[in-house]
Image (cartoon, rainbow, N blue to C red):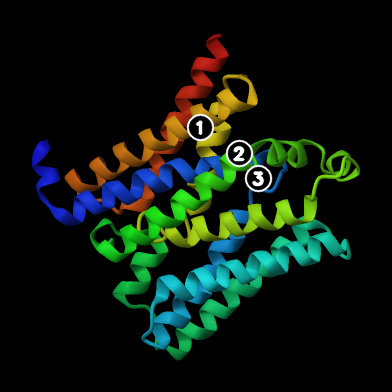
Amino acid sequence: MLEIFQYDFLLRAFAAGIIIAVIAPMIGIFLVVRRYSLLADTLAHVSLAGAAVGILTKSQPALTAMLFSVLGAFGIERLRSAKKIFGESALALFLWGGLAGAVVILGLAKGFNVNLFAYLFGSITTVSAGDLYLIAILGAVILFLISACYKEFFFISFDEELAEVSGVNTRGLNLTLLIMAAVTVSLSMRIVGVLLIGALMVIPVITAMQFHRSFKQTLFLSVFISLLSVIAGLLFSYYFDLASGGTIVLTALAIFLISLFISRKN
């Protein structure tokens, strides 16, 4: 089994996957508590349009995807904070807009190609050294922000109105959380794919919630489940020649089903 680690591209894939596995549920738990689980899927569709622009212009799809995703996060928070429409309606607008934009741009680019397929569903063979460095740097920044603002994120997730009355900068924190989610979505394209990253941010969290622990314990447990899903999924993907993104998500779903069985027995 150890021959898998003889290949540089697999070492990069595992390193990148482990980083994503840590930061995805750490952001996802705040989204799930706020009933904002579909945010990751929305930003994924927006970043897909950005990746399509990068492919069409023969630039850097990962960077254009991140740019579009961050701009989408700004737009969602602007609409939500203005309270002109409900939060889920803002998500729907950007989800449909991102998907429609991707379809139009793909039409201009004359359809699918191998690179786009890798962004859609993930491909462990496409993680370059540059991708790994970018994931590591931005992952470290996200971990720092979550650690530094953990109490504030916890506060606004459970009672945003009380946090605002208490003097917490809720608008800035909300925007920071959305931007971190946007960056995580775009960073995860190579491993899980933009169409499946939402699952990695949400499924480990709802799995951990089945054990009814404290918020912090649930956070750590969700990270452990995410790591297990990514590592096992990448191993299955390599040895059985399966799509990495789908295999990781199916592994996470299998762990969720096991957690349901265990929680019922307890």
Distance between the alpha carbons at the discs numbered 3 and 2 = 5 Å
Amino acid type at circle 1 is: Ser
Which is nearer the eye, 44 or 262?
44
SS class, disc 3: helix
**Label number found at residue 222:** 1
From this view, report whether residue 233 is shown above or below residue 114: above
Q: Residue at x 48, y 59 (%)?
A: 195
**Residue 121 coordinates in the image, percent (x, y):** 38, 60
SS class, disc 2: helix
**Label number found at residue 31:** 3
Amino acid type at circle 2 is: Ile
Which is nearer the eye, 219 or 240?
219
Q: Quadrant of the C terminus?
A: top right
Read off the residue under disc 2. Answer: 29
Q: Are the two marked residues, 1 and 3, in contact with CB atoms closer than 8 angstroms? A: no
From this view, report whether residue 237 is shown above or below residue 222: below
Amino acid type at circle 3 is: Leu
Q: Are the two marked residues, 3 and 2, in contact with CB atoms closer than 8 angstroms? A: yes
From this view, report whether residue 23 is shown above or below residue 227: below
On screen, residue 251 versus residue 70, left or right, reads: left
Q: Residue at x 55, y 66 (%)?
A: 45
**Residue 263 coordinates in the image, percent (x, y):** 55, 16
**Residue 237 coordinates in the image, percent (x, y):** 25, 47
Q: Are the two marked residues, 2 and 1, in contact with CB atoms closer than 8 angstroms? A: yes
Instruction: Work out whether residue 192 can be spotted.
Output: no
